[in-house]
Image (cartoon, coloured by chain):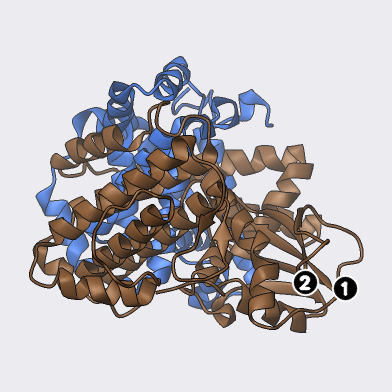
Chain colours: A blue, B brown
């Protein structure tokens, strides 16, 4: 386990408490988690998949997984945001790798016009998201491109290497170095959540 | 994979940009290297924050839909209790019913993997669960002649032809409840409908019924272009376990017994595990763990294995590795779905 001082996100008391309430089967706790993180989970799924219905499916699936087995979320092994985001991203990437992302562009535009931003979650994530955006901008172009292709494009590092015309080893190191730089920019003490 | 290679992959791993085999190798590396595990967590957290830059509120109705499903899904302690097989059966059938709730009338006519429409698939489910309910002594439907699953399915498709799908769904639900009610207190072996001489323990019956329900849940989702749902690890684990323990019987049924030979089946990913499988029935049973002197080590992702065993994924489409007598892997791939029906 990493030194807590080097952690990007700190687990909060609320997360520990809400987990206990989920274990006890309190559905209001699921509602709270949903209110806090649905924009994050749904927005991420939509960005990767580009299809409203599929993004809603992934969102439901992620929160139902938390509901079915809250014990799987271990606050000592990372924040709830990380747990939900990891699951949402995997589900979304599984989907796009299975399906051709044929409807991606058109539906993404339609989706963004038809939904209302969730003010609370947006406010909560705004500062950190701004820092991530800022960190992305300061990354060398080749690292940013690689990360965006992998994370939002759902591509494997091998596919990233093909798209960018670089060796696979280079793709691997760009992903790792780029992510590390963003992590450094988010470190407690330099800002973000914590 | 050596440690240096795994370390290089940490960024790609945090971004889900490795293939399944590589991700499993990285996870094994993280188990033995705490410092690398710390870096992996840090990069995962960073990836989640990347995701936050895309935040967007879902449509307002999704919250109520989700909470409604959640209230129906969580088995209360009285329903399944500490029995993992019954919890699995309840969870998979509840998930399937929640999926049925969301279907629109036009989606009922979409053709699924096995050639049945969604409507016919619901009838197929009703045909199967009612046959099993009868098998445990709790019949839920009268005067259906066929017992074996395929003819029974077609007989019931005829019977339900002019009736609303809700009728078939109601029979399915009643049969599922009858099986669960039997399982609360029942014990002994359950005859598999239409397969003379084949019976299952209560545990295996519940797990295989859940497995089949998951498979058809996937069928509907695949046909409608919706994301597939992977069961939680403890549920996958039960299905993987029953599937590997059935291999010797499958080998026998297909006349692929190889006396004295054994394989280690290593199913990777959350919910996976390791089993040593003899190529014959008898004194040597399937055991958990890797026994020495196996002829073959087969390594494959647990979800892929399950989808192969339900004939939804061709062995050639799986990323698997073998060490040792690779030709024996074909026997296992043949035996895994030996008792799969539609």
Q: Residue at x 27, y 49 (%)?
A: B173
Mark 2 in CB contact with mark 1 (< 8 angstroms):
yes
Are discs 2 and 1 located on one and the same chain? yes
Q: Which residue is mark 2?
A: B280
Q: Residues within 10 Å of mark 2 (few under 14, many from 20)?
A: many
Instruction: Look at the picture and state if B84 lies above or below A192.
Output: below
Residue closest to the eye, A188 or A48: A48
Pointer 2 indicates a residue of which chain?
B
User: For residue B79, what is the image quadrant?
Assistant: top left
Give how far apart the Cα atoms at labels 2 and 1 are: 8 Å
Residue A82 makes an appearance in the image = no
Q: Residue at x 19, y 42 (%)?
A: B62
Instruction: Look at the picture and state if B257 lies above or below A115.
Output: below
- The percent coordinates of residue B319 (x first, y second) are 61, 73
Instruction: Look at the picture and state if A5 lies above or below B183.
Output: above
Residue A158 makes an appearance in the image = yes
- The percent coordinates of residue B102 (x first, y second) are 18, 53
- The percent coordinates of residue B15 (x first, y second) are 52, 54
Residue closest to the eye, B281 or A29: B281
For the N terminus of chain A, the image quarter is top right
Q: Secondary structure at mark 1?
A: loop
Pointer 1 indicates a residue of which chain?
B
Q: Which mark is residue B260?
A: 1
User: For residue B65, what is the image quadrant?
Assistant: top left
Count of numbered circles in the view? 2
Residue B105 in the figure: left or right of residue A187:
left
Q: Residue at x 59, y 54 (%)?
A: B13
Q: Residues within 10 Å of mark 1 (few under 14, many from 20)?
A: few
Q: Say whether disc 2 or disc 1 marks the residue closer to the N-terminus.
A: 1
Q: Secondary structure at mark 2?
A: loop
């Amino acid at each position: 386990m990493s030194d807590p001082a080097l952690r990007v996100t700190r687990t909060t008391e609320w997360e520990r408490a809400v987990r206990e309430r989920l274990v006890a089967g309190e559905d209001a706790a699921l509602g709270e988690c949903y209110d806090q993180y649905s924009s994050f989970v749904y927005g991420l799924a939509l960005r990767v998949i580009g299809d409203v219905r599929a993004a809603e499916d992934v969102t439901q699936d992620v929160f139902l997984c938390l509901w079915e087995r809250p014990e799987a979320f271990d606050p000592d092994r990372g924040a709830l945001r990380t747990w939900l985001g990891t699951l949402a991203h995997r589900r979304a990437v599984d989907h796009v790798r299975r399906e051709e992302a044929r409807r991606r562009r058109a539906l993404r535009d339609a989706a963004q016009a038809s939904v209302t931003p969730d003010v609370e979650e947006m406010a909560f994530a705004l500062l950190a998201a701004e820092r991530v955006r800022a960190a992305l901008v300061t990354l060398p172009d080749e690292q940013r491109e690689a990360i965006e292709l992998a994370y939002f494009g759902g591509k494997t590092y091998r596919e990233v290497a093909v798209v960018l015309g670089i060796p696979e080893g280079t793709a691997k190191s760009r992903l790792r170095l780029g992510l590390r730089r963003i992590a450094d920019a988010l470190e407690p003490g330099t800002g973000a959540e914590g | 994979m050596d440690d240096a290679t795994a370390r290089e992959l940490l960024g790609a791993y945090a971004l889900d940009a490795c293939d399944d085999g590589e991700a499993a190798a990285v996870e094994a590396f993280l188990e033995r290297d705490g410092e690398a595990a710390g870096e992996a967590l840090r990069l995962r957290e960073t990836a989640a924050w990347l995701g936050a830059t895309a935040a967007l509120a879902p449509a307002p109705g999704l919250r109520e839909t989700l909470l409604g499903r959640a209230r129906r899904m969580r088995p209360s302690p009285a329903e399944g209790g500490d029995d993992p097989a019954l919890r699995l059966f309840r969870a998979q059938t509840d998930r399937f019913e929640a999926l049925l709730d969301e279907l629109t009338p036009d989606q009922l006519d979409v053709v699924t993997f096995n050639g049945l429409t969604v409507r016919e698939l619901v009838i197929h489910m009703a045909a199967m669960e009612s046959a099993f309910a009868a098998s445990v002594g709790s019949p839920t439907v009268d005067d259906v002649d066929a017992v074996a699953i395929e003819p029974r399915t077609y007989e019931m498709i005829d019977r339900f032809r002019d009736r609303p799908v809700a009728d078939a769904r109601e029979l399915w639900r009643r049969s599922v409840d009858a099986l669960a009610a039997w399982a609360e207190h029942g014990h002994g072996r359950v005859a598999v409908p239409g397969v003379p001489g084949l019976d299952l323990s209560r545990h295996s019956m519940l797990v295989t019924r859940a497995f089949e329900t998951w498979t058809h849940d996937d069928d509907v989702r695949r046909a409608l272009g919706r994301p597939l749902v992977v069961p939680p690890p403890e549920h996958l684990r039960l299905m993987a376990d029953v599937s590997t323990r059935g291999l010797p019987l499958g080998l026998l049924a297909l006349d692929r017994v190889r006396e004295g030979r054994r394989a280690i089946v290593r199913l990777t990913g959350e919910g996976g595990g390791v089993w040593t499988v003899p190529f014959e029935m008898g004194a040597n049973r399937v055991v958990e763990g890797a026994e020495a002197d196996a002829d073959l080590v087969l390594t494959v992702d647990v979800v892929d294995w399950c989808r192969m065993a339900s004939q939804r994924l061709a062995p050639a489409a799986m990323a698997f590795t073998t060490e040792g007598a690779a030709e024996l892997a074909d026997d296992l791939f043949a035996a895994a779905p030996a008792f799969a029906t539609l």
